[in-house]
Structure formats: structure tokens, C-alpha cells
Amino acid sequence: MPGPARLGDIVAALAPAFGGELVGDADLPITRLAPLDEADATSIAFLANPRYASQLASTQAACVIVAPAQRDAAVARGAAIVADNPYLWFARLTQWWAARTRAVAAVGVHASAVVEAGARIHATASVGPWVYVGAGAEIGPGAVIGPHGHIGAGAAVGEGTRLAPRVTLMDACRIGARGIVHSGVVIGADGFGFAPEVRGDDQHWVKIEQLGAVLIGDDVEIGANTCIDRGALADTVLEDGVKLDNLIQVGHNVRIGAHSAMAGCVGIAGSAKIGRHCTAGGGAIILGHLELVDHVHITAHTVVTRSILKPGQYSGLFPIDDNASWEKNAATLRQLHTLRERLRALEKRSPAP
Amino acid sequence: MPGPARLGDIVAALAPAFGGELVGDADLPITRLAPLDEADATSIAFLANPRYASQLASTQAACVIVAPAQRDAAVARGAAIVADNPYLWFARLTQWWAARTRAVAAVGVHASAVVEAGARIHATASVGPWVYVGAGAEIGPGAVIGPHGHIGAGAAVGEGTRLAPRVTLMDACRIGARGIVHSGVVIGADGFGFAPEVRGDDQHWVKIEQLGAVLIGDDVEIGANTCIDRGALADTVLEDGVKLDNLIQVGHNVRIGAHSAMAGCVGIAGSAKIGRHCTAGGGAIILGHLELVDHVHITAHTVVTRSILKPGQYSGLFPIDDNASWEKNAATLRQLHTLRERLRALEKRSPAP
Amino acid sequence: MPGPARLGDIVAALAPAFGGELVGDADLPITRLAPLDEADATSIAFLANPRYASQLASTQAACVIVAPAQRDAAVARGAAIVADNPYLWFARLTQWWAARTRAVAAVGVHASAVVEAGARIHATASVGPWVYVGAGAEIGPGAVIGPHGHIGAGAAVGEGTRLAPRVTLMDACRIGARGIVHSGVVIGADGFGFAPEVRGDDQHWVKIEQLGAVLIGDDVEIGANTCIDRGALADTVLEDGVKLDNLIQVGHNVRIGAHSAMAGCVGIAGSAKIGRHCTAGGGAIILGHLELVDHVHITAHTVVTRSILKPGQYSGLFPIDDNASWEKNAATLRQLHTLRERLRALEKRSPAP
């Protein structure tokens, strides 16, 4: 872990690409990034939401990243970095900070790795201990395959993409450049496809071998233990910039459009087509063979049972209540259709004037 | 990857066991299997659902697998394979195709594997790199244990069963013949069992060691990152032909009857007994200590809160709507019981004649 | 596997610490623990719920653990262990039984492990095959790291904590003493954090590097394939005695209070603060930036959409029904707000006297 960074050096490193003006003492030592209310005299904090502007007066931060509108209030209390989009500037700062403080993976192939014939591993890539690289696989420049990784035959990992320890990329599956894949992810397991066959009194399931693959674009991040199944005939596709959280299931032949983001525990059934810039909250389920156009947003724990052809927010979750109230309402819900019939009957007996 | 297959050779390989009559040019070269609307002049496609019969006229496929009813329409456009059940014939074809095109795992035990004393590995089995095989474990004829597999002490893998890379089969757990287990699966982790103990003001959880195992029948497929817990005292059981998709949780002492199939993200709590030929849609939850008889079908995202003793389809999911409509309906739902009371009061004031 | 245990020896081993009086033949041989209705003449069973007292007469068990109230009925049929809390005594017995019958992990570091400079592994710890131990990591006395484990740089595993095969503990994450972590768990993957950036017509997601870690207390158990993300700036925290089942997602900066327990497939979004002694049923979702006070219990498959400041049970799940009934009620639910308006109109026309 390196020592403190000089505030002026931080701004000098980021400002040419991302803007941001330092107001205050460039010599302040910075040891960490922190939320406003936990920051100390060697912390940088940020104010993104004007609702929290009152915290400016009380924060102990050495320096606060603020929008131009908060410039005066921020400067009144100490050093400030004034940026058009403080949250985005902060995001860039976390990247700079991580690059400064984290160990770099050793370039080269660990002696314990198994590399099959015909695999091509770029000289600047890092292949960790106990990594399997199948025949004909390609590992691009600067890519990092963490320990216990599995890169199947004919699979490909793009430039600068990092696989955490213990990631499975099955045969013929491909991920583009600058991706991040977290531990436990499985890309390219078989999709769930069976043909029913009646044998006597029994119905058996006959496996449909999954002959497609998974194609993943650039700048995609995939959370821990998420699964993306290979296609049945054609491929499962994640376009550029898609972000998936942990424990997500993506079925075979799904397509997720560019820059769409899914929260944890989402399930997407086979052959669903999801547009660009869509989002889904935690635990949402998207059934198969549906289409969602661009800019569709699904609330947490909602089930998408039909195609959605108009952008917007869609919801369907049961409201939480204390258990006793819920029980009464849930019981009544099971008679809801009958209630409606009774209401109709009443309306007939007591018509509107 | 081998070159094209001759259409006549494909049919000759499958017809003796599965029927199917080739009508057309047996010499056509086939390079892939494809959906009707993506097929090209070297593709085989299939028509299973008569609703898509209109695609027969426009498909570019070299050959289409059809039912006898579509024979004339299919033959009018080119080669056809006429089979009683085109979808099932297609499933068999995918298996033949996969066997033809995929690399076969090397027989034998990789030098990096660790095999404890008393383990029995059949001479025709394949044990990949960095596989652990515990004391007394058994690996059957033709079984494949992919890289990074863990076969616990006394565990058993049946004939021809294939474990993808990175599968955990804990001590004393057994899987039968012809199974397929995908990457990241954990079979035999501890069930979730604790006895509460009050200590002063606190309630602590005292672990109940899980002394049972997991017993899995023949022809079972288990999807990526699915978990099947070992039993507390008796065993957790999956009968023959069960198919589980990805990211499914099966609690301790569950029994799943033969040929039942569960979609992704399903959760089955401890000691649930599920019949034969049941299905559950994605994200369904089956609570513990319940019984489902044979041929029960649970809709996606439905919670089974009571035993189901009659075959049929059961559902309980909140309908999706645009967010504004949902908000209004959800808010009213929290007053549903009161609405019912008001309706009753009205009915008393305005009785049916 | 050792031979039978003598009943008297079992009680002698547990009674000094946990109480329990043996009534009956101390020389009975015991070969297994079993449920009342599956027990045989060499089994110990237990009766925790007085509702099942009628099984006492019919069980074949050699010995039954009972509360003082069932003493006479139990003794009338054979040997008995009388304990104030039979279920808790049974839990202790399972621990004793497991310790007696299970193989002990070999102390020391397996030759195939990779241990980076500056890692400290206690002489009594067990580090299995193909384990990676990063720079500066610490493995405490008696800790067990199963095969294929990954212990990141600066991470720490406390005394007596056992990691099953294939567990990932990322850099700087810490778990305390006597913990149990099951196979496939990922602790310390990146939280899901991005700042939106508009580029032309597109909105891109700019990664916020996750600079915090995960801190886990003592006596914590974590189920298979569960994920606990590292914090963005501060840490994600699990306090002492927390029990998590399988396939649970814990987002960044979550805090779970001591002795809280979560069932399988639960999802907890970022920055949620959960009190002590809370529980959540399977598939429940807790949205981000919420607070649950101590002793809050969430029913399975319920979504917590607001803070809960009062102890109690909270629910929100759609009742299951046969599909046809559900369809009618669900369709009506989408008009519920309108029904309420119609009811209001009727009430105006037919006012209460």
C-alpha cells in the first residue's frame, strides 16, 4: 500500500481528461476516499446530491468534490474540487485510486497452468495458477485470467479484460475488451432445452444439445456466480457496456442490448430480447421469447410476462405489510373476482343517476 | 471441427433407432443446424409447431425436419426428413451432431489430480487437471470429471456421467449414470439447520451437523451454480430423469420425483416432497415440509405455501403493469379487506331483491 | 467410519457441558441418529415437538431424547435421554457425532498450494491442494482451507474457521473464528456501482471501483454459492453469529446484525442495515438504503421496500391458487383502483344511515 497522495497530484492526473478545478491547498495529503459523514482530515469526499449539501458544513473531509453550484459553500470550509458532474468525477477518482493502490497481476503464464495446443496467449497477458486454456483459445493483450480459471477450447478473452479467480468460460465463448468477470461466473453452460418423449406411462426429457455459444461485447461487467448459458443453435449475446450484478441467470439465446444493467438475482428466460439502456431491479424475472424495447425499466421482483413495446417503468410486486394485515388482504385477494361480481350486482340495483 | 456431413449419412445414422424418412437429395452437404428463419443452403432446420408452417415457403434450409402433415409442403421446396415427432428427432440430431463435432475428454487421470487412498477410478474414466478424488470415492466407466472438480470421500459418479469444470460433489454423495452436471454446481453442502439457544438476552443458533447425503438417480441434469444440500439425518434425493436449470436451491431432505423439471432460480426449502413429472417456472419457491403430488405444475415466481394434492397448474404472481397503474392498484390492495367490509355494508343497505 | 458408539459413552461426553440424564441401558450400541419414524434398534431419535408425542409408542429407536414432560412415556418404551431442550441436545449430539465420524483435514500446507510472500499460516492450520494464499494473508490456528480455495492478499481467516472446497475470499476481506463457509461462496467481489455518463445519444456506465472490504464476525456460517460484495468506500459487515443459507446475494455496504439468519435465495441490496436477531424467508428481497430494526422477520418471497422500525413479522406475497382462479383474480387486480372508485360512488348513492 503506497503512502498518501498529494491533492494537487490527484487533480493533475485527472483534470486533463475529465476536467475539475482544484480550489485550495494542493499540498494536502490524501489517504483515502470516504463518504461525507465518515471523512477525516486526510479524506476526499464528494457531494453529488444537493439534498446532502447541509453535510458540507459538518464534514471533516480534507477536500470535497462539488458541482459549481456548491463551490462557495465548499470553499468556505476547506479545499474543493469543482466538477460539472461530481459523481462521475468521483467514479474516475476511484479508478485512479484503485490503479495506484492495487497490486498488478504478474505478466506471463504461471508454471502450474495447463495450456493446450494451438492456444494463443498474448505476451502481455497474465494467466494465473491452475488456469486451463483449451485448444485454440485466445487471450488478448493485457488480459488477466485469475487463479483456477477455465478457458475452454476456442474461447476468447479480449484486450484488458480481467477474470477474477475461478471463472468458467466454456468452449467457443467470447468476451470482448475491458471486461470484468467476477469469481464464480459460468459463461457457456448448456441452455435448458429438452424435447419431451412419451415412454409407456412416463414422459422423459430428451436433451437438446446446445450448439451455440455466448458472445459478449466490450466493457461488460458480470457479477459473482452469475450464469450465462450458451445458445441452442444461434448464440446468446450481451452487447457492449452491459452490466450484470451477482447471481443472475441468463438463459440460452437471450440478447441483452448495449448499456443495459441488471441487479442481483434477476432471471432472464430463454430467447428473451432486451433492448438498449434497459434496467431490471433485484429478483425480477423476464420470461422467455419476449421483447423489451430500449429504455424499459423493470422494478425489483417484477415478472415480465409479455413483451413491452413502449419505454417506461413497469412494476408488479406485492406490497409489504405487517403480517396480520397482509393475511387479511391476501385472503380477500383470493375472492377478488367475486367481489367484482358483487360490486356489479350492486351497481345494477343502485344505478348512477 | 470436422467438415460438412452428408445428409444421407445423417439420416442413416439416426433412422434405425429413431425413424425418419429422407425425401430428397442424400448428397447435400450439411454444415450446421439452424432455426428456420436463420437457415442457409447447408443447414438442417425443423418445423415442430404447425403455427410456423408458413416459414416453410421462405426458409433457405437445405433440409427441413417435418411431421407427415407437412410432407408435401416441405418436399415442394427441397429436401425433407419426415418424422412422427420432428422436435424429438431434432433433439436426437443435436446429440448426434454434438458427438460428431466435440472433442472427447482424454481417458485417464491427469498428472495434477490428487487421488486419495482407496478411491476407485475406472480405466475408461477421464479425470481432468486439479481434480480431487477423496478416499473411497468411485468414478464409473466413461465418466468425465472436468478440471477443478472435487469428489469427496466416499462419493460416487456413475457410468457415463459428465461433470463440467469446477463441480463440487461432497463426501458420500452419489450420482447415477448418464448424468450431466454443469460448472459451479455444489452437491452436498450442509443443509441449513440450527437449534435456537437463549444465552442471556441473545438467541444464538447452534449448528445441527448435517449427517445425511445426496442421492441422485440416473439421467439427471443439473444446471450451473445450482446447489443441492445434503440431508440432516436421512438423504436428499433426486430421482431418475430430473432436470434442474441454473441457480436453483434444493434444501436438505427434499425429494424430487422422477422426470420433474425446474427452471432457473427456483428455491425448494427443506423436506419438501415433490412428485413425478412436476415442473416449476423460473423463480418459484416451494416452502418446506410440503408435498406436491405427481403432475403438479407451478407457474414462474409463484410461492407454494401449502401441499398440493391434486395435479394441475398453480399460480400466484402479481401482474405486471405500467408503474403508475401498479402503484394505484398496489396501494388499494393494502386496503382490500376494508373494501370488502364496505362492500358488505353496502349489500346490507341495498339487498338483492 | 468407526463402529457403534455405546449409549452411555455418548451421554457421558455431552452431559457435563449440556446436561441430559440417561435412563435405561447404557450399553446399547448406537450406529446412527435418525428421525423417530425412521429409527431402528441402533438409532437415537429425538422428540422436540409435543405434537409428535404419539410417535413415541411406535418408534423403533434404541433411545429417544425427550423433555421431562415426556419422561414417563419415553421410558416406558426403552432407553431415554431426558433433557430440558431436546432439540438443542440433539444439535449438540450431531456435533459430537460428526466430530467422531468425519475425517480430520491434514494439518499443514499441501505441496501444490501457492503461498505468496508475507502470508502467515498458523502451524495448526490446514491448507489443501491448489489453494492460493495472497501476500500478507493470515490463516489462524486450526483453520481449514479446502481444495481450490482462494485467499486474497491481506485477507484473514480466523481460528478454527473452515472453508469448504472452492471458496473465494478476496483481498483484504476478513472472517472471524469458528466460521463455516460452504463451497462456491464468493466473499469480496466488487459491489455493483456505476456513475452514468452521457456520451452523445448513449448513456454509459462508468465503474466506481469498490475500495472497501468485507468484515465477518465470529461463528458465522455462509451457504453454498452465496455472494457477499465488498464495500464501495466503507466495508460490508456481517456481525457475530449470522447464518446465511445458499445462493444469497449481499450487496455492498450492507450490515447484518448479530444472530440474524437468512434463508436461501434472499437478496439484500446495497447499504441496507439489518438489525440483530432478524430473519428472512427464502427468496425475500430487501431493497437498498433501508433499515430494519432488531427482531424483524420477513416472510418468504416478500420485498422490503421501506425501512421497518418496529419488530414483528412482515409479509407480502401473492397467494397461490389454481391457475384459472388466479387468472381471474389477477385480471381483476389490475382494475382494483377502479373498483374502489366504483365502490365510493355506490357509497355516495347509498349512504350509511
Image (cartoon, coloured by chain):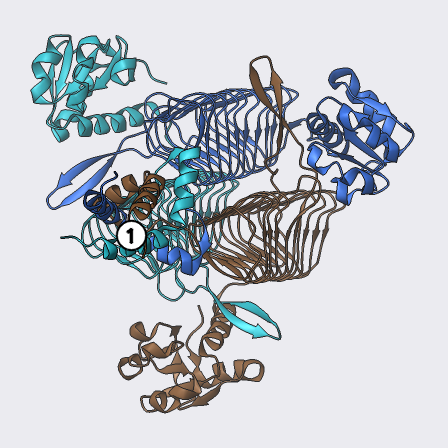
Chain colours: A brown, B blue, C cyan
- Residue B254: quarter of image: top left
**Amino acid at circle 1:** Leu
Q: Is residue B320 visible?
A: yes
Name the one closer to the observer, C345 or A201: C345
Horizontally, residue B344 falls left or right of residue B122, namely left
Is the residue A9 above or below the residue A285 in the image?
below
Name the one closer to the observer, C305 or A244: C305
Q: What is the quadrant of the C terminus of chain B in the image?
A: top left
Q: Is residue C313 visible?
A: no
Rendering coords of residue A139 (x, y %):
68, 54
- Residue B112: quarter of image: top right
Q: What is the quadrant of the N terminus of chain B in the image?
A: top right
Is the residue B79 above or below the residue A285 in the image?
above
Horizontally, residue B214 falls left or right of residue C176, namely right
Give the residue displayed 45% in from the left and 75% down from the top.
A87
Q: Dot 1: what SS?
A: helix
Residue bearing mark 1: C343
Rendering coords of residue B223 (x, y %):
54, 35
Horizontally, residue C306 falls left or right of residue A159, namely left
Is the residue C290 above or below the residue A40 in the image?
above
Rendering coords of residue B79 (x, y %):
87, 31
Rendering coords of residue B238 (x, y %):
47, 23
Give the residue displayed 64% in from the left and 57% down from the top.
A239
Name the one closer to the observer, B169 or A202: A202
Q: Indicate the chain on which mark 1 is placed.
A: C
Dot 1 crowding, Cα within 10 Å, few <14, some 14–19, many 20+: many
